[in-house]
Image: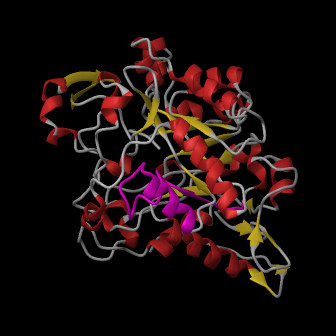
Amino acid sequence: MGTQESDEQTGGTGRRALLGAAVLGAGGAVLGLPGTARADGSRHGGGRGGGVRSLPVPTVIGHRGASGYRPEHTFGAYELALDMGADIVEAGDLVPTKDGHLVCRHEPEIGGTTDVADHPEFADRRRTKSLDGVSVTGWFTEDFTLAELKTLRATERIPANRPHNTLYDGRWEIPTFEEVLRWQNEQTRKRGKQVWIYPELKHPTYFRGLGLGTEERLARLLRKYGKDRKNSPVIIQSFEPTSIQRMNRLVRNPLAVLLSGAKSRPWDFVENGDPRTTADLITPKGLKEIASYAQGIGPTLDLIIPKDSAGRLTEPTTLVRDAHRAGLILHPYTMRNENPFLPADFRNGGDPDAYGDVFGAFRTYFATGIDGVFTDHPDTGVLAREDFLDDWLVDGSRQQLSVRPRLE
């Protein structure tokens, strides 16, 4: 997921038939079991026929890998996410190099995620640029060739919250997306089950303005590896709706539009003079439009359950219900274990690297009927899902429950 994450600044009938999903009531009550029980005891909510709707529900998505335990967007983080049981790995926030390769970094500015500042040979590459209207100073991938980037090593992005992750600084290099596609094949063979990935196109309008259009480069790689089809295990996401529309014309992959705060405007809308905000996109009309070219949305969790001025959860919105009525899947972002990233209701103390009541938070968000969630801690997400589904399962039969968010 992308720059617009606020927490980093501090279906329709067919869907329910396919997923065996919960029906969301107006008061936040959930009726039915959100998933089905298999003979081996595990729960899956996926439908038949493969593709994105065959994934377990709620889907656990490793956000930039298992980035709560390893520096993000490294093969160490990606593989650990799979080891921990993630259903999908967000392998790739995609940004281009000077010579046109797509690499996996949270942002094009790499001063905070690599050791580039320790390389005197690149000192003169430090620049200040306007990135989606924001002045950013640092080192940018588009100013480096791939060979130059391969001399760098990944570092922990938020060491104040994850000092233990700094143990792994310098261990892994920056992966290319082509390497990720090969890794996906290798891991699928090694693990005996299909590995899914969820790449994000970062700042596509910005890069198109530099002559480094990323959609076409991504489409070429997907076609090269035979992963450009409707049921391919690659979901493509972007905060820019026009970028997803472009991808819809280039490939047949499942697509998702990422959504930031309600008052924000996608940068492509700013550039194109489209006056709409995220609030317009999450209306029934806006969701219907998104459903004409995408299969899902990735809203910030605050669009699912807003917070009050003290950071405590309020009442759920109607977004889950409205998106499902439009036939869209919801994969909101981002669940993290550490106190600063949790709603105030679920924090334990004030230590920035201490864990809060994340299981309570997961349960609250799962109860809204979301189809999955991005998390930096996939092991926590998997356990939280098991807890949530076990609450619904009594002697293998479906029971009616009323699950309310913890708001007291």
Pick the quarter of the image with the C terminus. Answer: bottom left
Q: Splitting the image into 4 quarters, where does residue 299 fall?
A: top right
Q: Is residue 284 above or below residue 213?
A: below
Residue 164 vs 376, above or below: the answer is: below
Give me the residue at 71% from left, 26% from top: 251
Residue positioned 39% across, 13% down in the render? 210
Along the line of sight, the residue nearer the viewer: 173 or 2? 173
Q: In the image, residue 49 lies at what x, y percent?
A: 87, 50
Where residue 204 sits: x, y (%)?
A: 47, 23
Quadrant position of residue 163: bottom left
**Foreground residue among 7 and 102:** 102
- Queried whether the magenta region covers residue 59, the answer comes back as yes
**Residues shaded magenta:** 56-83
Relative depth, front residue between 264 and 9: 9
Position above or below: 127 against 161: above
Total numbered badges shown on the rendered structure: 0
> Is 62 within the magenta?
yes
Describe residue 102's horizontal placement relative to residue 285 as left or right: left
Residue 244, visible in the rendered structure: no
Does residue 162 appear left or right of residue 102 in this picture? left
Horizontally, residue 165 falls left or right of residue 296, namely left
Q: Position of residue 326 (x, y in %)?
A: 74, 39
| Residue 298 visible in the shown view | yes
In this rendering, is residue 274 above or below 313?
A: above
Of all residues, the one furthest to the bottom in this rendering is 395
Question: At which x and y percent is residue 149?
Answer: 32, 34
Q: How is the image coloured?
A: secondary structure
Rendered image quadrant of residue 112? top left
